[in-house]
Amino acid sequence: MNARIALFVILAASVTLSREHQAQACFNVTQLELDQDTKRVKAAEDALANDDYAAARQKSATTLRVTKSWWSNNASWTDRQADLVAWAPIARRALRVHSLATVRDASSTTADRELATKNLIALMKRDPDPTLAIDTAEAMAKSPEKEALALMMLRVQAEKDLIGSAHAYAALTRLERAHGNEAAAVTAHERCVRMAKHARVCE
């Protein structure tokens, strides 16, 4: 009996060690994936800063697909992607980049831009960061029904001198001009030109 008990203890210990080893291996793989996603999203952010929308969308989309697989048992990814990635800072960054690149990319469809704007609005509601509010206002500025709110949001941030995006100043320029505020439009355009890496952004 003692021999059998001893054998059972040895086997149980072996199983426990095996499970701990497997768990550690899973953790290492997950950490590696997160490290890769961090590098990928940083590259996407750099691409967005250089107005390379295709690269920004491609690199951020890869991270979003990975995040989607983590949440494969949840509701529709297309309908709720902003909610599903709210827990993960790296995924939030990826969603922001992908959404902004979509909004700025002239080849995007209206439906793509609308979804991108909804995603930015959802992220903004979870995060009080002024930069995210500015990004969201920039996206909203392309929706006729949201223009008035976008103008108000951009004016508030411009008055505080918090806008660091040429694209946001380009949106403010267009909105001010559309509302007959030429002096404000000129000021916004001048700031856009000073910030833009590519002159076409302010045209």
Image (spheres, grey):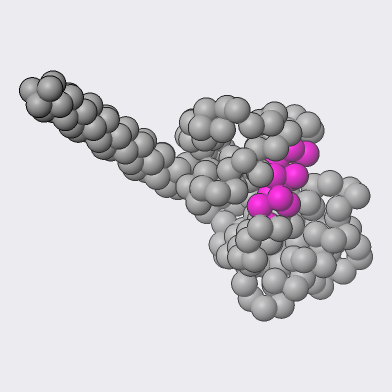
Query: Quadrant location of residue 100?
Result: top right
* Nearer to the camera, 192 or 75: 75
Look at the picture and state if 195 lies above or below 66.
below
**Residue 171 location in percent, x, y?**
74, 56
**Residue 190 location in percent, x, y?**
66, 67
Name the residue located 67 percent from the left edge and 78 percent from the top edge.
160
Please identify the quadrant where the N terminus is shown.
top left
Q: Residue furthest bottom?
A: 160
**Residue 150 location in percent, x, y?**
80, 59
**Does 198 lie within the magenta span?**
no
* Nearer to the camera, 70 or 191: 70
Query: For the magenta stretch, what is the residue range?
Result: 113-124
**Residue 140 location in percent, x, y?**
78, 51
* Nearer to the camera, 48 or 71: 71
Q: Is residue 173 visible?
A: no
In the image, taking residue 27 as reference, residue 79 lies left or right, namely: right
Question: Chief secondary structure of the magenta span?
Answer: helix
Q: How many marks?
A: 0
In the image, taking residue 201 as reference, residue 17 lies left or right, namely: left
In the image, taking residue 59 as reference, residue 138 lies left or right, namely: right
